[in-house]
Image: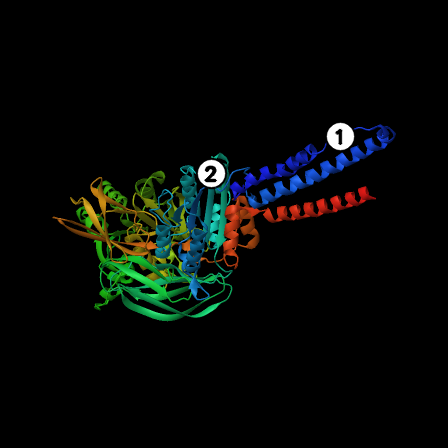
């Protein structure tokens, strides 16, 4: 292309030497005289040589003038090939500005976004009047592929107002939006500028399938695209983040101790110590400690917690770091419940309490109540003889324990199945009075019943005892047990003859036989313990393992399946209301205090709320009010985990990726940034080499003319 197209008119001046040559020939007239006949041969040779020399000089002079005119027209070679005689076309530019959380990191006293703003302003300064530009931000959930504008002041104001958002950099989506902008542009000169850091977790998403899609879009485009990337970050990747926060032994029970497990991840190559960590509940500080984290590893901490009241509460773990702040805290909504109402249906209740099948379990689940002490227990326990149980009161309990069941009646079985299907928990512990044939027929039913397994007659009848073996401590039901139990003797135990497909083993005896098996039934859970829960079991009922084990089982069974109460920033919140409502809309309070609303969609008897404005991490309070009452729910939006890892993409991977995407890198830190941007827009100008060629031709013409003149004179 030519940047000064009008100067090409000077090529016409190249004909001037030819015109002068022809005019000079017209001034002379040939006259023959007699003596010339003796010089005819010599004159012919001289004329032939002189004509060749004159033509050579004429070509040199015409080439000098033509090349000079071309050089003054400022020809340029640009990416995508030579554009012939086309002059400078109007440019349509799309600038992609990364506003993801990683751009808030400070380097050399200023944030990455500050540096990016300066780069974007220099890009705008390199544009000319009449050019069009569109500005797109990464992580903008409400981004639209807007039409380009010639109002650079408006674009500059938007750049100045840009702030780091809370969503991960969605380069794939924003680059597709950029192509959509170009598809609607009329200009043939299309330029894309990406101003971002080199965060590996963000850019790595563009490898693979997206690269092929991107190249296909470029091939189908109506005009070539010139794309550039301007990375603004250093090579540093240190950062600390609160990675997870959860209860060790859910559910949380009012007044009962629990433990919060907090994981702190160190993304840097060096160990970090003296990390201030605070754990609070609804703004009230529970603990303040100093933690440390290994290099590129995770430090897991456990902090005792006790909740004084029932209801949903927000637990927050926070640290203070010097890099990224958005991941310095993490919230969790904890549904604190009253003591779990537990019904023990015993098949062997006796006049002497210690001889009853329910005695030790009742002590384990409600130790303070059993000792008449005014302290909170994890469970409120009631005991009924199985044969005298009235199924009508089943709705008052969250967990039912079948202790040494002799035989369950059809009405009782139907009530138990409905109870578990609706989300209740059931613990089955066969004993001395349990008839295995009836148990398998009614409770197992070939794998379709409540029991996770079919059982055989107790092994103790053959005089065989065993000991506790391996427990799967990673399972939620056993998570509160910090260590494997000792090899306690089990005097009476039932072997398993068959298991339902949905069951899984939680613990076993030392001989490999199952001790604890769990399965689901409808919305509820069932646990089968293959030994009695009373004294006949052996050493276990009088050991230190018994109380935490039984409390853990009942906690697990009594904690209704927790609803999904957290999503990542930018994801949709979906809430199902606990009770029917006549309200049409819900009010949502965002973490910064601002308010929004969402429609309540009818979903059966209970309403459903879908909310998409989740850019801010933190706690969202959803309030539904109607004449019948008010429902308040809390939801947590987590910061994007990918943004916590600030490690930049390695140089070789970076070069490979930008080559695959056909991006040309420009170093924004170079003092010649304006020159680089100008060259990116106008291409590589070749006027200077052309002027050199003109000078070379001039010297050649002068030397040839002088040489041939002196030869002719000689």
Q: Looking at the image, which residue is at 36% across and 38% down?
A: 446
Q: Is residue 387 above or below residue 304?
A: above
Q: In this rendering, does residue 431 appear at all? A: no
Q: Secondary structure under badge 2?
A: loop
Q: Position of residue 414 (x, y in %)?
A: 24, 41
Q: Residue at x 40, y 37 (%)?
A: 184
Residue that label 2 marks: 188
Instruction: Locate the C terminus and report the quarter of the image it occupies.
Output: top right
Q: Nearer the viewer, residue 154 or 160?
A: 154
**Element marked by disc 1:** loop
Q: Residue at x 35, y 64 (%)?
A: 318
The earlier-in-sequence mark between 2 and 1 is 1
Residue 552 placed where, x, y %? 33, 58
For residue 513, above or below residue 114: above
> Left of 236 or right of it: where is 142?
left
Left or right of 374 in this view: 323: right
- In this rendered view, identify the residue nearer to me: 118 or 657: 118
User: Gap between marks 2 and 1, in whole Å?
Assistant: 60 Å
Quarter-wise, where is residue 463 in the image?
Answer: bottom left
Residue under label 1: 30
> Of tags 2 and 1, which is closer to the observer?
1
Q: Position of residue 144 (x, y in %)?
A: 35, 44
Question: On the image, which quarter does residue 8 sit in?
Answer: top right
């Amino acid at each position: 292309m030519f940047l000064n197209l009008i100067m090409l008119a000077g090529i016409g001046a190249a004909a001037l030497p030819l015109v002068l040559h022809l005019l000079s020939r017209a001034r002379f007239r040939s006259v023959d005289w007699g003596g010339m006949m003796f010089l005819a041969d010599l004159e012919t040779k001289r004329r032939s040589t002189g004509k060749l020399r004159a033509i050579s000089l004429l070509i040199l002079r015409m080439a000098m003038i033509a090349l000079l005119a071309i050089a003054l027209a400022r020809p340029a070679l640009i990416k995508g090939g030579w554009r012939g005689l086309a002059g400078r076309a109007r440019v349509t530019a799309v600038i992609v500005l990364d506003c993801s959380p990683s751009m808030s990191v400070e380097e050399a006293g200023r944030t990455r976004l500050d540096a990016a703003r300066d780069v974007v302003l220099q890009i705008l300064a390199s544009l000319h009047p009449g050019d069009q530009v569109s500005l797109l931000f990464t992580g903008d959930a409400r981004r639209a592929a807007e039409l380009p504008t010639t109002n650079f002041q408006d674009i500059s104001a938007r750049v100045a107002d840009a702030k780091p958002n809370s969503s991960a950099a969605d380069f794939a989506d924003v680059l597709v939006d950029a192509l959509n902008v170009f598809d609607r542009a009329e200009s043939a000169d299309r330029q894309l500028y990406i101003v971002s850091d080199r965060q590996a977790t963000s850019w790595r998403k563009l490898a693979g399938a997206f690269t092929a899609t991107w190249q296909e879009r470029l091939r189908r485009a109506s005009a070539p695209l010139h794309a550039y990337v301007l990375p603004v970050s250093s090579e540093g990747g240190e950062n600390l983040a609160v990675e997870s926060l959860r209860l060790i032994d859910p559910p949380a029970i009012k007044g009962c101790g629990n433990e919060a497990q907090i994981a702190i991840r160190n993304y840097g190559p060096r160990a970090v110590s003296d990390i201030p960590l605070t754990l609070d509940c609804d703004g009230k500080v529970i603990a303040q400690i100093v933690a440390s984290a290994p290099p590129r590893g995770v430090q897991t901490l456990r902090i005792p917690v006790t909740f004084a009241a029932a209801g949903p509460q927000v637990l927050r773990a926070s640290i203070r770091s010097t890099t990224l702040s958005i991941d310095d805290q993490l919230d969790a909504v904890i549904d604190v419940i009253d003591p779990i109402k537990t019904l023990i249906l015993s098949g062997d209740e006796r006049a002497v309490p210690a001889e009853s099948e329910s005695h030790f379990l009742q002590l384990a689940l409600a130790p303070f109540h059993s000792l008449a002490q005014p302290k909170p227990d994890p469970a409120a326990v009631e005991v009924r003889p199985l044969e005298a149980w009235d199924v009508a009161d089943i709705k008052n309990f969250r967990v039912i324990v079948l202790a040494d069941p002799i035989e369950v009646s059809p009405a009782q079985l139907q009530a138990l199945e409905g109870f578990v299907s609706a989300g209740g928990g059931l613990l089955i512990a066969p004993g001395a009075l349990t008839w295995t044939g009836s148990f398998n027929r009614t409770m197992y039913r070939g794998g379709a019943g409540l029991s996770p397994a079919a059982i055989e007659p107790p092994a103790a009848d053959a005089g065989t005892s065993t000991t506790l073996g391996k427990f799967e401590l990673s399972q939620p039901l056993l998570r509160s047990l910090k260590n494997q139990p000792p090899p306690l003797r089990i005097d009476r135990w039932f072997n398993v003859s068959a298991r339902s497909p949905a069951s899984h083993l939680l613990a076993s005896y030392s001989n490999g036989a199952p001790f604890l098996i769990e399965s689901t039934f409808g919305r509820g859970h069932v646990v089968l313990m293959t030994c009695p829960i009373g004294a006949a079991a052996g050493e276990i009922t009088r050991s230190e393992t018994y109380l935490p084990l039984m409390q853990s089982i009942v906690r697990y069974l009594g904690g209704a399946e927790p609803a999904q109460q957290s999503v990542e920033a930018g994801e949709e919140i979906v809430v199902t209301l606990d009770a029917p409502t006549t309200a049409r809309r819900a009010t949502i309070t965002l973490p910064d205090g601002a308010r929004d609303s969402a429609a309540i969609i009818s979903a059966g008897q209970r309403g459903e709320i879908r909310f998409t404005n989740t850019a801010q991490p933190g706690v969202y309070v959803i309030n539904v009010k109607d004449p019948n009452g008010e429902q308040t729910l809390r939801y947590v939006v987590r910061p994007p985990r990918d943004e916590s890892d600030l490690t930049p993409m390695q140089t070789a991977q970076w070069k490979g990726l930008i080559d695959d995407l056909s991006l040309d890198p420009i170093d924004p830190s170079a003092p010649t940034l304006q020159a680089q941007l100008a060259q990116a827009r106008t291409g590589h100008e070749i006027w200077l080499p052309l002027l050199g060629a003109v000078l070379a031709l001039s010297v050649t013409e002068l030397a040839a003319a002088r040489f041939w003149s002196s030869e002719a004179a000689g």
